Image: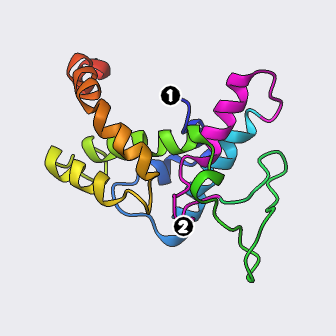
Amino acid sequence: MLHDVGKVAISDSILKKPARFTPEEYKVMQNHTLYGASLFVDTSSPVDILAKDIALTHHENWDGTGYPGWINANTGVAERTDSEGKPIGKKGEEIPLGGRIVAIADVYDALCSKRVYKDPWGENDVLEEMRKLAGSKFDPELIEAFFEILPNIKQTQNQYPEDAIAE
């Protein structure tokens, strides 16, 4: 539930915008990963470490194209950069397992749900997109696990529909 906790530091004018972000707004939004991870810099338990990893890495992509990349969550300083000084994205198993799992859950939820900027996708389109992103955005082994447990996910969705949660 706390993977996006860093969004509390993002202006509502961006968070609630009913349209696509400008490139500048997108850069601001990307900082939610660092803001969220910074809440757990004084880790005192394995749960704190997991929360920090998830907040920081749930937008990293399996192929290295995600964000925020190799940034020290304690200092905000890039640890590995490209020739332009931009952080290099983590890829593959460099991304902590918790971040890889939450990336799948986050995209699945985003595609299935209505947002201020979009209507929910149909189930077949969502599942097709999830499969298509295996190996680029997502860990391919975890996508296979996702499809294995999909009946359990669907059961939970039916048990706790969004309309009931909002009430």
Badge 1: how crowded within 10 Å, few (<14), some, or many (20+)?
A: few
The reply to whether residue 16 is in sight is no
Q: Mark 2 points at which residue?
A: 65
In this orientation, which residue lies closer to the viewer: 34 or 11?
34
Query: Magenta segment, which residues?
Result: 41-68
Decide: is 13 above or below 54. below
Badge 2: how crowded within 10 Å, few (<14), some, or many (20+)?
A: some
As drawn, is 17 to the left or to the right of 82? left
Q: Say whether disc 2 or disc 1 marks the residue closer to the N-terminus.
A: 1
Residue 13: give its label.
none
> Which residue is pictured at 60% across the width and 39% down the height?
54
> Which residue is pictured at 57% across the width and 56% down the height?
92
In this orientation, which residue lies closer to the viewer: 107 or 8?
107
As drawn, is 25 to the left or to the right of 132? right
What's under tag 2, amino acid-wise?
Answer: Thr
Image coordinates of residue 156 in percent, x first then y, are: 28, 21
> Which residue is pictured at 81% across the width and 22% down the height?
44
Determine whether the residue tagged by mark 2 lies in a helix, strand or loop: loop
Decide: is 89 above or below 100. below
Q: Mark 1 points at which residue?
A: 1
Image coordinates of residue 130 in percent, x first then y, are: 31, 52
Image coordinates of residue 117 in percent, x first then y, are: 30, 54
Give the foreground label among 2 and 1: 2
What's under tag 1, amino acid-wise?
Answer: Met
Determine whether the residue tagged by mark 1 lies in a helix, strand or loop: loop
In this orientation, which residue lies closer to the viewer: 47 or 92?
92
Image coordinates of residue 17 in percent, x first then y, are: 40, 54
> Which residue is pictured at 68% across the width and 23% down the height?
47
Instruction: Indicate the quadrant where residue 8 lies.
Output: top right
